[in-house]
Image (cartoon, rainbow, N blue to C red):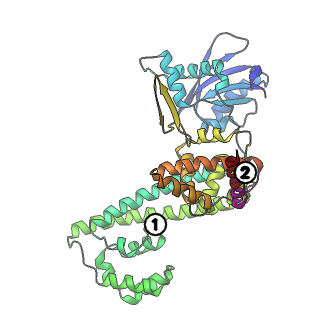
Amino acid sequence: MDIDKHTFAAHIGLDWADTKHDFCLKSNDNKAFEWGVITHSPEAIEAWALALLKRFNGQPIAICLELKSGPVVNALLKYSFIVLFPIPPKALAKYREAFTQSGAKDDPSDAWLQLDYLIKHKSALRVLHPDTPETRAVQRLVEDRRSLIQDKVRLTNRLTAALKNYYPQPLEWFDDMDTQLFCKFITRWPDLKKAKSVRKKTLEEFFRINNSARQTVIDRRCHAIKNAMALTQERAVIDAYSKLVLALVRQLSVLLETIHDYDLDIAQRYRNHADHAIFSSLPGAGPVFGPRLLAVFGTDRARFKSAEEVSRVTGIAPVLERSGKKSWVHWRYSCSKFIRQTLVEWANKSIRYSFWAREFYDKKRAKGQSHQAVLRTLAFKWIRILFRCWMDKTPYDESKYLFALKKRTELTKTT
């Protein structure tokens, strides 16, 4: 569909909400604006969409809204005659300020603003092109997994704080809290008195059953348990905090099982994906960053025109501002934090597995640049490489890149 030829029979601004969606419509054969409200339900959205289909004889209809994903987007994507134009919320907020300096905001007026923006600045918006179902599934799963990891961090932090109040020893006995072994131990022995009352043979059997097979580790833990000293004997403190700890451990155990299920599902979908070979070839990508990098780029090769565009969209490229004789560079705020985090964290991981990445990092650090600044610069360089591999559908080859890098360096010296 050629958007520049004004092929739409109608333009609609849609302001979404949890229970209702206000819309403002302008058709090509009528100068007046039409206003309305759709109840947020599958039946109401279906009835509204079918009414538009019948009214405009199946001709394309452009809808502008502040979402790239979500319930209303999922509901509208199944209609082939509807073309969605997501508008960044910050762009709409600035546009609203031009009309309402008081800061007033209302759902019907926001619907009109989105319609007005769509009609006057359509070239500044991009049509929402859903990726393949396989890619969208990976994208959704890796983002949700990241949220679950953050929930796990919050739980372990609360658990640590609670244990420190009456039973701090397990934090020393176990290297990691986010394991089923730790959860099972605390569930069985939620305070030091109960742990010390157990025979050594019972403890050894418990550790072996729960995949802690190294005898030296088992002996060290058993010895530490038997010789541990209680932080407090106050039963009010012990009973209250042990109850909280047990509640937190149950949540943590379920969460760990859920994350494990996510890992299995992501791994299977990632292995079966058409672009698996590209992202699995990247140094340090592995089973965690491989799927996340796949989610960043997607499958649609028309999505990005250049590596520079990828750097801007992902938030890796900094923003330059000028005012008078002054200029400054700052962090890019309008971007997906998950995507930017993915690229920076992977750049850090690649240092261990890529010769040139390690050399680049060491040189920049030797010049006095901070760790995070170097990682952002390294991520910027990786995007250029990854973009070319992605566009050509070719796995990354470190030896080929080093050879090309050496050749380019020699050519620069001769010129």
The quadrant in which residue 25 appears is top right
296 vs 306, nearest the viewer: 306
Crowd tier of the residue under label 2, counting other residues whose Cα lies within 10 Å: few below 14, some 14–19, many 20 or above: some
**Residue 193 in picture, x, y percent from top left:** 28, 78
Q: Which quadrant holds the N terminus?
A: top right
Figure disc tally: 2
Name the foreground residue: 122 vs 206.
122
Q: Which mark is residue 275?
A: none
Camera-nearest residue between 392 and 6: 392
Q: Which residues are magenta?
A: 393-404
Secondary structure of the residue carrying numbered label 1: loop
Residue ID for mark 1: 178
CA gap, disc 1 and disc 2: 36 Å
Asked which quadrant contains residue 219, the reply is bottom left
User: Which residue reaches farthest bottom?
Assistant: 201
Reply yes or no: does residue 97 show up in magenta: no
**Residue at the image point whose x is 58% and y is 49% from the top:** 379
Residue at image position (50%, 82%) is: 209
User: Measured from the top left, where is residue 147 in percent x and y?
Assistant: 51, 52
Q: Is residue 185 left or right of residue 352?
A: left
Q: Which class describes the residues within 10 Å of circle 1: few (<14), some (14-19), or many (20+)?
A: some
Q: Which residue is mark 2?
A: 389
- Please state which amino acid type lies under the numbered disc 1: Asp
| In the image, residue 351 above or below residue 52 | below
